[in-house]
Amino acid sequence: MRSSLPAIHVRMHAYWGYMAASVLWSAGFLLESLILFRFLWCRLFRHYPFFFVYLTVVWTTNLALWPIYRYHPAAYKTSFWVLQFFAVLAGFGVLLELMQKSFERYPGARRFATIVIVGMFAILFGYFAYPMLGAPLASAGQHFAFFERDFRTVQALTIAGVLAVIYYYRIDVGKNLRGIIAGFGLYVGSTILSHALRGFAGSSFGQEWSIIQPYTYFVSLLTWAMTLWSYAPAPVPEVSPEPTHSYEAFARGTKEELGAIRAQVGRAERQ
Amino acid sequence: MTELLLFTAVGAGLLLLLVLVLRRPPAPAEGGAEALVAAKRSLHALQHGLLPIELVDRIFGKQDLEYVESLDSGPVRDLFMKERKRLALAWVDQVRRQISGLRDFHTRRSRMFARMSRWTELSVGLDFADLQIQCRALHLVLQWRGPYAAPQLVRRTASTAAGLCAVLDKSLAFLTPAVPKRLGDDSGADAAAL
């Protein structure tokens, strides 16, 4: 009796783990469906088409993967990474949308942010997509698994670039975009942390994280469900987005004064 | 190990930046009454609250110290020095806050320019950051050496505030709609306003 206890414990643990994963998967799928329904009902897809496509891809992926997981578990891993590839690509569309919508009424800030996004996408394509060209499907899955951490890192740096511009210019992006950024940032950030720590701590951490990561994704879904319930755009600035004064004259004036101030403070510090 | 640190820094940095962005209140739309009033308040605080030479001389001049020292009381002198240091630090902090105000004012304005130069904007941003750091360094010097340790430093900081005033003046001029003295000056041959 005593000798069979660990076996029972392991079976119970596996059972509860499976149950928790199933409940979480079902709840996540329901939330995704709810968000998509709200997008269609409130016609939010007109305002955030890339995010709608992204969520549709994720929803379809989940729908397709469940029967594969149940009936063809051997094919699950390759299918997961191949389908995940499309989800990650669609995720980049969300980043473009974030940049476009966040800085829609702030052309100066948009100009600054565009170079960040384009640069990151070029790095991403060169680093990730090029080695996969011509590779067979099975090895493409392995390639993707291998590159996912780096891929997410590029995504994280891109989001960080957009966030830095939003932070510096103190731009009000509105409730919807704030929610998209929060959910997406949380998911990408936690994924990178999981890869980094899993690589360091090994499979023991991997098992823990396989429970934690779906929860962070669930929190992201909850955030999206709450913030994308209805259309809530950013407030419109009261002035024209194209001031009549020259930027160069404005910036030069600020820069000249700053130069004088810095020289004075620098001299004072040296005394 | 390096890899772990690098990727952990990226992941944690993103989450931290996310928290910072979500917690920071956005700046009101430029051109609104709130921005104009805030900018004018900054200007007023500098010109009438921080910059007057009498005030600077009173805080950082040695007249008060000489009087307290003439009382020949150690505890009174210590208390005086402590309070004066607090006052001097508060003054420097106010100047730093006004620089922050200028930065906010600049960014609120520059974000609207479609033909903004990225490199110039980056350079201005770095200048602001540099200036903020220098102000913090000044704060440390005052904290460490006391309010009377660097009179030159105080005068130069006052000049800094004066420079800042000029910048705010220029920025406010951008916000104030120009009213031509006489329409005829700005009109074409058909008397249409240009």
Image (cartoon, rainbow, N blue to C red):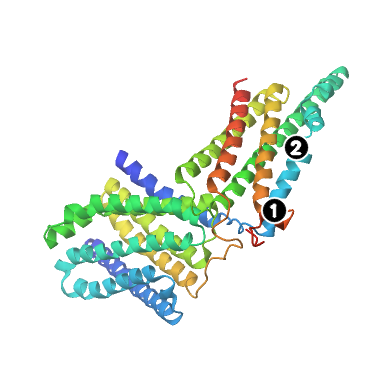
The local crowd at label 1, few if under 14, some if 14 to 19, many if 20 or more residues have their Cα within 10 Å, is: few
In the picture, the quarter occupied by the C terminus of chain A is top right
The quarter of the picture where residue A85 lies is bottom left
**Position of residue A57 in the picture relative to residue A113 (left or right):** left
Residue on which disc 1 sits: B185
Q: Residue at x 71, y 26 (%)?
A: B155
The answer to which of marks 2 and 1 sits earlier in the sequence is 2
Q: Give the spatial CA distance, label 2 vs label 1.
A: 40 Å
Residue at the farthest bottom position: A41
Q: Residue at x 45, y 46 (%)?
A: B118
Q: Nearer the viewer, residue A253 or A4?
A: A253
The image's mark for residue B50 is 2
Q: Is any part of residue A88 visible from this angle?
A: yes
**Position of residue B163 in the picture relative to residue A20 (left or right):** right
- Tell me the chain of label 1: B
Residue at the farthest right position: B71
How far across and down, in percent of the image, does residue A90 sit?
A: 31, 65
Q: Nearer the viewer, residue A251 or A144?
A: A251
Task: Label 1, secondary structure: give it.
Answer: helix
Picture layout, residue A108 above or below residue A217: above
In the picture, the quarter occupied by the N terminus of chain A is bottom left
Three-letter code for the amino acid on which mark 2 is drawn: Leu
Task: Label 2, secondary structure: give it.
Answer: helix
How far across and down, in percent of the image, does residue A69 sit?
A: 21, 71
Picture layout, residue B169 above or below residue A186: above
Viewer-side label of 2, 1: 1
Q: Is any part of residue B18 visible from this angle?
A: no
Three-letter code for the amino acid on which mark 1 is drawn: Asp
Residue at the farthest front position: B189
Q: Residue at x 28, y 72 (%)?
A: A62
Picture layout, residue B13 above or below residue B147: below
**Position of residue A23 in the picture relative to residue B78 (left or right):** left
